[in-house]
Every structure is written in C-alpha cells, then in structure tokens.
Amino acid sequence: MPSLTMDAIDINILDQLQDNAAISNVELARKIGLSPSPCLARVRALQETGVINRQVTLLDPLKLGLTVSVFIQVSLEKQVEKALETFERAIRTYPEVMECYLMTGDADYLLRVVVADVPSLERFILDNLTRIPGVANIKSSFALKQVKYQTALPLPGKGRKGARSR
C-alpha cells in the first residue's frame, strides 16, 4: 500500500466526502478549489493508500422498521484465543449486529444490535447469541433515544460542529 502525506487539501477532500460520498468529482473539485483532474488524482491516491476505505449509503433504520437499538454485553466462559475466534466468527454472520467490540472491564464484548421489535431481539438472543459456544453471560440495555450518531471521523484541523450528526 503506497504511503501518503496529507495536506490541507486532502483533509478538505476527506471532509467533503465524509459529508457526501456521492458528490461528483466536478462538484468536489469546485468546493475545494481544484480543477477536476488533480482532484480526482488526489481522491484516487487517498483510496490507494487505504485512507478512503470504502463508500457506503447510510439508511434510516426507523424508516425500515428497525425501531429497537440494544447494547449487549457478552461475557465468555474463558478468554482464550480459540473462544474469542469462535465468538467473533459467529458474530460476523449476524446482520442484526451493527458493531462488535472486544472490551476491557466486566464484559468481554459489547455489541450494538438493531432489530424491529422486542420479540425479534428475543429470537436473536435465544436463537443466536446463546448458541455460540463459550458464551457465559449476556446483559442487554435498550437505547431509549439516539442523542448523537456520527459516521464522520474527526479530521486534523477541522472543527466538526456536529454537521453530520443525527
């Protein structure tokens, strides 16, 4: 993977793309003050170095009927490599799991799960989580309200001002 030294223009490109990945190259070039060819070359360099990992479309879960957001703490019987690998391999197969983190503290993993309703959550826990070998304890906390949701990373030299929060 080629290395890249980023300057203020690269940071501005990233800021614009985090706000709207569907922006045309011509519009992006106009917003950052470059002509289209050098702008496209910079975007491609950011992609080649892996700074731009991928582009996605963010969907509104409520409009899709996914109204229940739950944080689930999972503890394993043993924190050995094989148990961790088994759990992580299983978790990657469940589309309801939006995020999964290996944690320090009381629980081994923290999951963010999105489902349509409480019965769907019950099915997910009983049919999936409890059947993963090595799972010892599961604790769930329902999110009552999403206060902040952000996908844009904080960039050096850029004040975020909550522009891409929901």
Image (tube, rainbow, N blue to C red):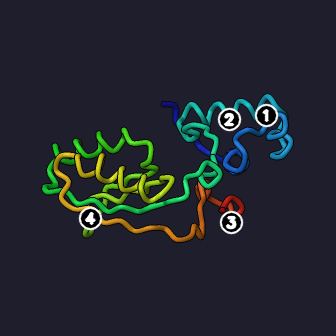
Q: Are marks 4 and 3 in contact (CB under 8 Å)?
A: no
Q: Position of residue 62 (x, y in %)?
A: 62, 55
Q: Label 3: which residue?
A: 162
- For the residue pair 62 and 1, the one nearer the viewer reads as 62
Graded by Cα atoms within 10 Å as few (under 14), some (14 to 19) or many (20 or more), the crowding at tag 4 reads some
Q: CA distance from mark 2 to mark 1?
A: 9 Å
Q: Which mark is residue 71?
A: none
Query: Nearer the observer, disc 4 or disc 3?
Result: 4
Give the residue type that dot 2 points to: Val
Q: Is residue 77 above or below residue 49?
A: below
Give the residue type that dot 4 points to: Ala
Q: Label 4: which residue?
A: 107
- For the residue pair 131 and 56, the one nearer the viewer reads as 131
Q: Are marks 2 and 3 in contact (CB under 8 Å)?
A: no
Query: Nearer the observer, disc 2 or disc 3?
Result: 3
Graded by Cα atoms within 10 Å as few (under 14), some (14 to 19) or many (20 or more), the crowding at tag 1 reads some
Sequence order check, earlier mark of 4 and 2: 2
Q: Are marks 2 and 1 in contact (CB under 8 Å)?
A: yes
Q: Position of residue 20 (x, y in %)?
A: 72, 45
Give the residue type that dot 1 points to: Asn
Q: Secondary structure at mark 1?
A: helix
Q: Residue at x 40, y 68 (%)?
A: 141
Left or right of 143? Residue 63 is: right
Q: Label 2: which residue?
A: 43
Q: CA distance from mark 4 to mark 2?
A: 40 Å
Q: Are marks 4 and 2 in contact (CB under 8 Å)?
A: no
Q: Residue at x 22, y 42 (%)?
A: 86
Left or right of 4? Residue 12 is: right
Q: Secondary structure at mark 4?
A: loop
Q: Quadrant of residue 154?
A: bottom right
